[in-house]
Amino acid sequence: MKSEETPRWASALDAVVVYAQGALCSRLARGTVPPQGRVRVAGLPRSMDPGSLRARVLGDTGVRVTEVRVEVDAEPAATGSTDALRQEVDRLGDEEAAVEGRRDRLLARIKEITDLRPVPPARKRDDPHRRTPVEAWLTLADFVDERLTALHRRLVELETELSRVQHDLTVATDRWTRSSTDAPAAHVETTVCAVLTLDGTGEVELELEYGVPGAVWVPAYRLAYRQSADSGSLVLRASVAQRTGEDWTGVRIALATADLRRRTDLPQLRSLRIGRRQPAPAATGWREPPAGLADLFTGYDSAGPRPARRPTTAAVAVGAAPPPPPPPPAFAGGAPAPVLPPVPMPPQETLYGVRPPRPVDPGGLPPSVQAAAPDSSQARQRSRPRAGGAPAARPPAPAASMAPPPQAPPAPPAPVTGPPQPTGDELDYAALVLDGPEQPGNRRGRLFPHTPSDPVAVEYRRRAEAVASLPLPGHAVRPRKSAGSFDHRYDAVARADIPSDGTWHTVTISEIPVGLRTEYLCVPSVQEKVYGTLVLSNATDQALLAGPVEVTVDDDFLLTAALPTLAPGGVRRMGLGPAEGIQVTRRAHLNESTAGLRNNVTVLDHRVQVDVANRLARPVRVEVHEQVPVTSDADVRIEERADWAVPDDEKGPDHHAPGTRVWRVDLPAGGTAALHGGYEIRIPAAKALAGGNRRS
């Protein structure tokens, strides 16, 4: 059935699921099933993967899809479908060239007026000097000044106009570079259609699903909270970039961290049994050829040679007189071009579907022997007597003696036990093609894989996949890297528009409630500075992937930080930068002494005092970290004398190093606190600490 007789249904993109790389698109089409049951659904992009096309009927209508395939149609583009941005760039380029031309001509005119000088007439040798009238000098000066004033005024206007045109050209060029790839790039518009065969009658709604490359996404967040509350609002957003060749306008967006190209079929674990009784082998999908397949093309082969067609080369029909040569073409000088005589071809008997024998050279030797035989001119040169009376070379052997030596018959193939095991390509029945009678005898009438290659579609997919190399936004992390071994999906609450321009676009997905508390952290032994942190707890069943987060405190933007991956039920800490309103000071004192019966134990007594002052107008909670040395030697003892605590790594948001001790103190507005701690290190006299016994 011709394509114009098949009704064409319009389709609209409804939903898109963006994976870590690539996307899965869903289109909807509605119409009445024609009597022949075949329809064409247009609007598919050129970069789609033909093997990913799926179709189904929505609702319980009794109609089902029995066949679906992809076809590409080419038709002249409409008059109004040309690239307006490209035309605007060309127009502005021509306008810039015109303004530059007017400016250059005006500069040449200014130079001509500037070069005007009074030139006295030529004076003879005996003539006395004459005085030039002052009025003439003044008149010329006034004329030059008046003309230059008008020309410079016009030059300023042209320079302003040229700057405006150049700015407009730069903007138009940038818009053209970043424009969507959904528009046709030539005067011929190619359309990818899905040809469906439906079984049933009535009005139906179809859903077409297909995969496309050229789409990536990274998560982003916006966190808003108030300092007096213990919870906040975390808005999940996404930076999406796509260059699939079609604009996503008003579509339902979903984001997934899975790999679209990863195989999802489960492996089959087969058991090995010992004994004579074995399970029946599984079906392989291979079937024996039907009986009499070799006789299927007997009539085709016995039909004789193909009908003679009008020869277009030197070959002519067998048994017919050669056609008259065409009139010789004339060169530029009028002389006719030389015509080579046609080479007579030996008669050959060609049957339908039978490969013709290799042509034989008029010399009587097959091509393989001719390649090995020496050239006649070379043979004549070798047969001539050499200078100095050298004997002549032996003439070449006759053709009969130059036949190739008989080759040993090929070894018979090893016997195959059991039916053949087809590969995955041979089991793809949609890609199998029945070979016709023109193929060799072992392929005629059999199914073989055939995957046609469309270089245009390959180029479209290559351009689409280039979007994966876009530079990431600040603090952004690829979803596959932050998701780990788990896959997550996030559905947007509203429809969105994402053009096919290959740049990042921000889409709001949903709002996630999180638990928040503000804590201030300092390690005075390293740096006497307090840092603000947010402790986030995820009480939902969705994981929060790593990415940038814009923090807003009391409706004021604070900073953009990096949010770590937060699993469901997890607790993590996020830094907010130094807190200048809280001051901390650390003082350490070391007293070294000896103990024991013979003073054979060195005692290192460390005293630490940390003063914390809150200069903020609200109460705060400060966490002060200290480090206590650890030892694996049983003779070295460490005794602590402080009210600090050992952090609980299982419940805390951070992982602490061994020997970490923590003070947690709540300070009111304007309050201060003094923290005291210490420890003793008892070392036998025969041992010493690594790096010396000095401690600050």
Image (tube, rainbow, N blue to C red):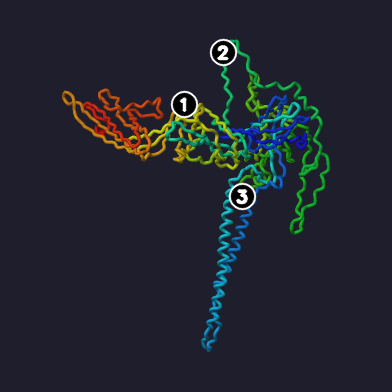
Q: Secondary structure at mark 1?
A: loop
- Mark toward the start of the polypeptide (3 vs 1): 3
Which residue is at a point 56% across and 78% down the rendered structure image? 139
Which residue is at a point 61% across and 55% down the rendered structure image? 93
Determine whether 559 is above or below 35 in the image: below
Quadrant, the C terminus = top left
Task: Left or right? Give the position of 678 relative to 268.
Answer: left
> In the image, residue 77 lies at what x, y percent?
71, 45
- Give the spatial CA distance, label 3 vs label 1: 101 Å
**Can residue 79 be spotted in the picture?**
yes
> In the image, residue 600 lies at what x, y percent?
18, 26
Name the mark on residue 569: 1
Determine whether 79 is above or below 602 in the image: below
Task: Left or right? Give the position of 97 relative to 196.
Answer: left
Of the residues shown, which amino acid type is indicated by label 1? Gly
> In the image, residue 230 lies at what x, y percent?
44, 31
Q: Nearer the viewer, residue 143 or 511?
A: 511
Residue 343: name its quadrant: top right
Task: Left or right? Give the position of 279 relative to 340.
Answer: left
Of the residues shown, which amino acid type is indicated by label 3? Ala
- Give the spatial CA distance, label 2 vs label 3: 84 Å
- Judging by the rendered image, the residue that carries numbered circle 3 is 387
